[in-house]
Image: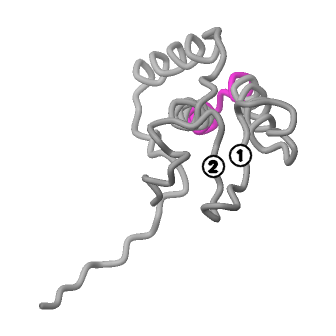
Amino acid sequence: MEWTAPRVTAASGLALDGLDSAQRAAILEQLAVDAAAPGEFPADTYFGGKALQRQALLLSVARELGADELADQIADRLEEELRSWTEADGCAQRTERCFAYNTADAGMVGFTPAFGSEEFNDHH
């Protein structure tokens, strides 16, 4: 069996240039609401990772729409949260929002783990 597929160039951003002014205004309004939403990011590797991805997507939308002040606000919050996850000695300081190397299983595990990830049952 054999098949072919055309190569597709990956998009470097979101295709928001086709929005009309009402759509653009509605998205910017919701972005402001989402950016101002209080609360911490979840501390586990699954839901925390999803929240970080959502924040990064909000940042991308804000930048695409030229909402620089809002984008900076979103980026500051994202950067602060990512910093805690990427501190080299994070697991020596706390039991969540960090990654450690598990020598027995020869793999990285995030703390707080979720859905059995500490058992290395869901690697992609």
Task: Give the color scheme: rainbow, by chain, secondary structure or one colour.
Answer: one colour
Mark linked to residue 99: 1
Density class for disc 2 (Cα within 10 Å; few <14, some 14-19, many ≥20) is: some
Q: Quadrant of the N terminus?
A: bottom left
Magenta residue span: 60-71
Depth order, front residue of 39/14 = 39
Q: Is residue 70 magenta?
A: yes
Q: Position of residue 60 (x, y in %)?
A: 59, 39
Label 1 secondary element: strand
Residue in view at x 44 percent, y 37 percent: 115
C-alpha distance separating marks 1 and 2: 6 Å
Q: Quadrant of the C terminus?
A: bottom left
Quarter holding residue 52: top right
Mark linked to residue 109: 2
Q: Are marks 1 and 2 in contact (CB under 8 Å)?
A: yes
Q: Is residue 91 magenta?
A: no
Q: Position of residue 54 (x, y in %)?
A: 53, 32
